[in-house]
Image: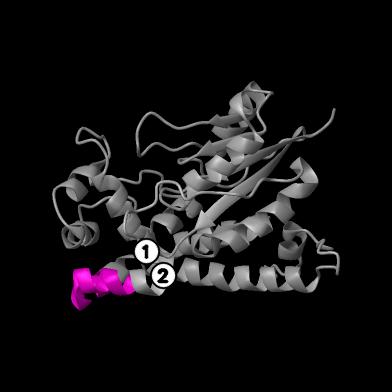
Amino acid sequence: MKIRPVVVHYHLFKNAGTTVDSILNRKFPGETHGHIEGPYPWSVVSPDDILAYALGNPALRAISSHQARLPLPQHPDVLFLPILFLRHPIDRFASVYDFERRQPADSASPSVAIARNGGLAAFANWAVERESTAVCRNFQVAHLASTQLDMRKARSTHVDYLQALAHLRSLPFFGLVESFEESMKGLQDFLRPHIGELNLEFTIQNGSPGRKATLEERLEHIESELGASLYRELLERNALDMLLYREAQQLFAMIRGRQQASTQPSGTPKSAWGRILQRIQPSR
């Protein structure tokens, strides 16, 4: 039996996932691109759920999910190809706030009411409190670690960070929101042998109105809105996410540097993203 390639987009909330989905929609129209979510904003879609969904829908060539968790499913008849993006956690915090403010007042998400009823500083005060959800507290570590599954009360530990980092390093591809165009080039190289070319033209989806152009400008604006003390406290609540993000930046730069160095004069990479990543994995 011919092995079926299926792209799995781990659509982490406010990590450019809607823009990635718009690119996948062009490549996989209609029923070839499926979406799977649980019944609640805090539900979890397990690797077994993804596998069952793929096997039960043989036309699928891509699956997107906000709630899908690693590790990647395994099956002898299906080659699962992951897409996952990470983002600077403080930049992501402001994007979460802007997005939640625009949601309906009757949303089941606990953070919507907080965002709708106050400013950015009020949202930050809530995010750092004991009673807040994990939406802006080491969210990416919690998501990648896949050990604490209820995001209403997840509190990531250093053990979770190590598990998240191991999962990140095991992926044949990941991208960074702040290096989106470079990431898409890497994604193209990773997916090309399995699904052919992607149309990488995109328009930012679900962007925040008035968003400043650079990450440095956005972080400065956030700090000015919160004040130094609250900004520092928000950083502390996202210390593990910051560690994961810094590790991802270094790994991403290493991968892209080696990929560009191995590019032939014709512009065709000699080695796909995944093979480069595999070669530079640290010994365990």
184 or 36: nearer the eye? 184
Compared to 209, does 232 lie above or below? below
Residue 120 point in image, percent of width and height: 21, 60
Q: Which of 97 and 143 is in front in this view?
A: 97
**Mark 2 packing: few (<14 Cα in 10 Å), some, or many (20+)?**
some
**Which of disc 1 and disc 2 is earlier in sequence?**
1
- CB under 8 Å between callouts 2 and 1? yes
Q: Which of 177 and 83 is in front in this view?
A: 177
Nearest the viewer among 161 and 128 is 128
- The three-letter amino acid code for the residue at tag 2 is Leu
Quarter location, residue 38: top left
Residue receiving disc 2: 215
240 lies above or below 25: below
Q: Which mark is residue 91?
A: 1
Q: In this view, does 54 lie to the left or right of 139?
A: right
For residue 81: magenta?
Answer: no
Q: Which residue lies furthest to the left in this view?
A: 117
| Total marks in image | 2
Segment colored magenta: 219-233
Q: Residue at x 42, y 54 (%)?
A: 142
Q: In this view, does 124 lie above or below 111?
A: below
Left or right of 121 in this view: 102: right
Does residue 234 appear to the left or right of 39 in the view shown? left
Is label 1 in a helix, a strand or a loop?
A: helix
Of badges 2 and 1, the one in the foreground is 2
Q: What residue type is labelled 1?
A: Asp
Q: Is residue 271 shown to the viewer in this render? A: yes
